[in-house]
Image: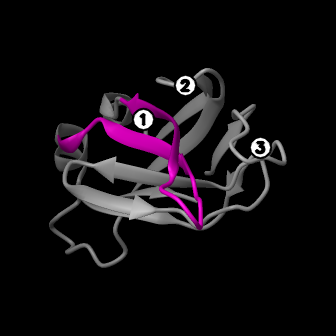
């Protein structure tokens, strides 16, 4: 699975941006690394949220916010999207393809989420899970 954005609005004088993503589920929050000088970021790695599937869905929606990182001033907001996790109750994978970012003039977000049992789950606790993004 992966997280990417496309057609982001330029934020730098050079016509590019330095995007970073903040992903929140309930009170839990993870951040991507910053990708420099791009309007088409693709983030690699795995972000995960632990809990039972029911807990993860109840804590939703999954909120993704994009920021342009600025070294000399505050970061610029680039758009956001909230993703309903209830489809994971029916199948273990959820894909969002080129969804329009909200609260910005342009840009889309693509995301694939996978629900998978935690490796260290107790044998009797089949609901223990991780929500991953790779």
Q: Secondary structure at mark 1?
A: loop
Tell me which label, 1 or 3, sits earlier in the chain: 3
Residue named by callout 1: 91
Residue drawn at (34%, 29%) of the image: 84
Q: Point out residue 95 in the picture as x, y percentages from the top left corner.
A: 56, 34
Residue drawn at (45%, 43%) of the image: 65
Q: Which residues are magenta?
A: 59-83
Q: Gap in Å between the C-alphas at discs 1 and 2?
A: 31 Å
Q: Is residue 103 above or below residue 24?
A: above
**The disc label shown at residue 45, or none:** none
Quarter holding the C terminus? bottom right
Tell me which label, 3 or 2, sits earlier in the chain: 3
Label 2 Cα neighbours within 10 Å, binned few <14 / some 14-19 / many ≥20: few
Name the chief secondary structure element in magenta: strand
Label 1 Cα neighbours within 10 Å, binned few <14 / some 14-19 / many ≥20: few
Could you tell whether 90 is left or right of 67 in the image?
A: left
Identify which residue, 15 or 45, lies in the foreground.
15
Q: Point out residue 113 in the picture as x, y percentages from the top left corner.
A: 49, 46
Residue named by callout 2: 104
Q: Gap in Å between the C-alphas at discs 1 and 3?
A: 29 Å
Is residue 107 at all visible to an observer of this figure? yes
Quarter of image, res 64: top left
């Amino acid at each position: 699975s992966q997280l990417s954005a496309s057609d982001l609005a330029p934020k730098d004088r050079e016509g590019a941006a330095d995007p970073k993503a903040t992903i929140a589920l309930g009170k839990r929050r993870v951040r991507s690394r910053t990708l420099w000088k791009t309007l088409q970021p693709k983030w690699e790695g795995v972000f995960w949220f632990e809990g039972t599937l029911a807990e993860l869905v109840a804590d939703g929606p999954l909120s993704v916010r994009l920021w342009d990182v600025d070294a000399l001033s505050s970061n610029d907001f680039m758009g956001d999207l909230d993703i309903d996790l209830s489809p994971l109750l029916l199948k273990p994978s959820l894909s969002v393809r080129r969804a329009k970012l909200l609260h910005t003039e342009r840009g889309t977000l693509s995301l694939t989420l996978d629900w998978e049992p935690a490796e260290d789950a107790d044998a009797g606790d089949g609901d223990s899970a991780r929500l991953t993004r790779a």
